[in-house]
Image (cartoon, coloured by chain):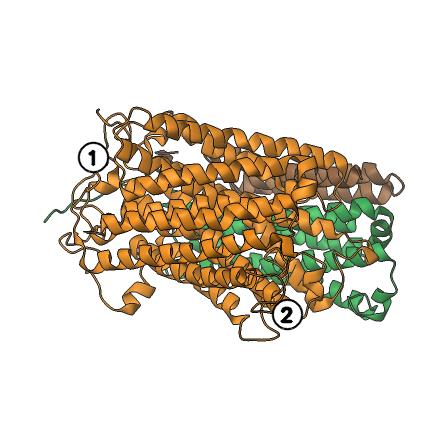
Amino acid sequence: MEDHSKEKQHIVSYKENFGTWLGLMLLTALTVAVSVANASLITLTVVTALVIATTKAILVAYYFMHLKFDHKLYRIMLLIITLLFSSFMLLTIVDYLSR
Amino acid sequence: MSESLSTDLNFFQVKKGIISWLFSLDHKRIGLMYLYAIISFFLVGVTLGLLMRLELIAPGETIMKAKTYNQTFTLHGVIMIFLFIIPSIPAIFGNFFLPIMLGTDDVALPKLNLLSWWLYVIGALFALSTLVFGDGPADTGWTFYAPYSVQTNTNVTMSVMAAFILGFSSILTGLNFIVTIHRLRAPGMGWFQMPLFAWSLYATSWIQLLATPIIGITLLMIVAERAFGVGLFDPAIGGDPILYQHLFWIYSHPAVYIMALPAMGIISEIIPTFAKRSIFGYKAIAYSSMAIAFVGYFVWGHHMFTSGMSGSARIIFSVLTFMVAIPTAIKVFNWVATMYKGSIDLQPPMLYAMAFIFQFMIGGLTGLVLAALAADIHLHDTYFVVGHFHYVMFGGTGFAMFGGMHYWFPKIWGRMYNIKIAKFAFALLVLGFNMLYFPMLILGLMGMPRRYYDYLPQFTDLNVLSTVGSWILAIGLITMLVNLINGMRKGAPAGRNPWGSISLEWQTKSPPPLENFDKQPELNEGGPYNYKN
Amino acid sequence: MAHFVLPNSGHNYDPESSKLGMWLFLFTEILLFGGLFIVYFVYRTINSDAFLRASYELNITMGTINTIILITSSMTVAMAITALQKGKEKFAINLLWITLLFAIAFLINKYFEWSIKIEHGIFPGMEHYNGLETGQKLYFFLYYFMTGLHALHIIVGAIFIGFVIKGIQEGNVTADRISLLENSGLYWHLVDLIWIYLFPLFYLIN
């Protein structure tokens, strides 16, 4: 990541920002709707909710936080941290599920 | 640095007065302030340790009551872990030498660096305030295990807040180093032309950055628990005390590598300098630092083999723990291979480095004994663990830090200490150290439990030996420090490069000028350890 | 006496350094909340029915409103960056003020949510709370702890945005020196990100 500070900064247009917002809104509506409609299918609701939340998170990170236009170093670091945290979660939960 | 600064003055001389130190943005001054503070806390911790050893010189109550003993070992642990060994090498030598070794004039975020220092001071004040306020210092052990930490009347909240604040100081230092290494390497210095000390700090910083927040939030939960009395880790309301242990060790095991990795970095600097040979397997050492940092995240469960974790989880953690030994062994192999057929010059830093390898090996191998599930059931709550831990932390990191102090001393103060006395002090330290801690390994195998102020009469002989060892160690420490202080004040001028090293910090004057270099630093062709012979 | 300039000095203005530093800080924030999410998931695993029943106490409408507020405020911050990059300081300042208003609206909404629950006696130590079944206590404790910590982050983020507004007005934050705005924006988005997970895990699990 030595020289890209001199690279021209990508300016995200208002339109892209608004589009991202629209996407986030639709996903919010979807996740609420799924939750209200599927009251009996507990696990399914949780999994869907988490998948939708992660999609929203990626949208925010890529467009609002400019990750898409930044050096790929940032994406790699975020990926590694997500994996690291997931392994913490996994290893802890394994203990509880196997007791 | 657009304005021209005189490089005739060194960084001690540029500005005078205590304020110019306390609010200095100069990484060298911040590093030195850490040095003075950390050594002071170290001496407090040592004193507490000596008192504990004195209590244990004979069975029964010798000089203190059970509760006082519990508070003493808690305070000893909190001070040694959070105030001494976690900040020690990164905050002192990392701050002082990382920018110089990278060929730059400061860390990337100097103001943040000052903030880390102040957080450290505030955290230290919190920790010490437990001595004065409330019902005395915590008596939980440095791990603050729930539910006892929630129930005891002693000053747990303050101790926990201290650990929280010190954690943030540590996070910000790590953050600063990562940015510095990414952004401020000298032109032409690629990742694999960096000194290995920088590599080890890079790995350490990632652990500081990513593991510390977990303990931060866990400690906040303990504080909230004590305030609202919910019983978050209380089985009576569906909670689980073992979860606290999970969260605690998710940080505190990687923290062991925060303590050990920078020490390994110092050893990787000292050995090629005094063997006058290029380091064997540069890339292997660099990568193994990262590998230790990475694998080290996933082994925390080995602290909980006897606490009621599920059998499958125990097996997973045991296997992972054995894996972390591999990159460590790679490093040891590389250091020894570097010395092989070198022209070894047994100056004090080299002696410390060799003691490090020997003692760290004992610490590491006893660690593998503990990683084996069946053996751990017997050994977990015995002195074997105390011996193992001190071999790694004191015999390893502590000795590496002393080695670093003797290695970089002439660069920091521009003077040389008395070499003969330094070697004498070293001999006392090695003798005292091994006499103090080796008996603990045997006592542990015999079944003496840890964390009690009392023991059965059959353990007396070895305990006496251990206590006498602690006195020799103390005399060694005093000799070493007095020798260094004398050298600081009236030692002979050392010149730029007394050890004949080729890494960048030795190209500038001793002590360095304010912005580190008086001429453009020149990178050594073929990497930082390319000794010609 | 030598005069020379190190090309890699630590005292230069380097937006890339501050951005990298900010991201690293955000990683620590992720793991800070991450610790709480681990607690949440573990307790949810061993008390799933109680968590389910407790979540009926939360008001989905209020949670949804707050979600919309935060997402919209994220957009206004992102647009403020665009505006400043295009040199439209006035517009950027206005967008940031709107963001601040959203932040306040979020906190007010949160305040009402909490006070309704506390009126019903659902707070550690209160009567209704003490009568709850075991797992539900954990749920509510985590609810207060996590949303409380999140609200604290909202306040800190709002303060930073306040500084940015001042910076733009005084000409210290411009299209060429946009670091402070960018980094405050990153922080604000992270607060939004965390809410994106808090919302379904507390409000939508029934």
Pick the residue in front: B74 or C126: B74
Q: Chain of mark 1?
A: B
**Could you say whether the residue bearing mark 2 is in a helix, strand or loop?**
loop
**Residue A76 left/right relative to A95:** left
Q: Which chain is orange?
A: B
Whether residue C5 is visible: yes
Q: Nearer the viewer, residue B137 or B216?
A: B137
- Compared to B470, does C4 lie above or below? above
Q: Amino acid at mark 1?
A: Glu
Residue sitting at 22 percent across and 56 percent down?
B487
- Label 1 SS: loop
Which residue is the site of mark 1?
B522
The residue at 63%/41% (across/down) is A57
Q: Looking at the picture, how far across and down is residue B261, in whole percent? A: 45, 40
Q: Position of residue A81 (x, y in %)?
A: 57, 38
* Chain identifier, green in the render: C
Circle 1 packing at 10 Å, graded few (<14), some (14-19), many (20+), is few
Q: Is residue A3 left or right of residue C1?
A: right
Between residue B161 and residue B255, name the one nearer to us. Answer: B255
**Which residue has dot 2 on it?**
B154
Tell me: B176 left or right of B425. Answer: right
Image x and y of residue B463, in percent: 55, 54
**Mark 2 touches mark 1? (CB < 8 Å):** no
Say which residue appears at 41% left-offset and 40% top-offset.
B356
Instruction: Looking at this view, name the residue that lies furthest to the left.
Output: C1
* Image hue for chain A: brown
Dot 2 or dot 1, earlier in sequence:
2
Same chain, marks 2 and 1?
Answer: yes
Which of the 4 image quadrants contains residue B218? bottom right
Q: Is residue B131 left or right of residue B262?
A: right
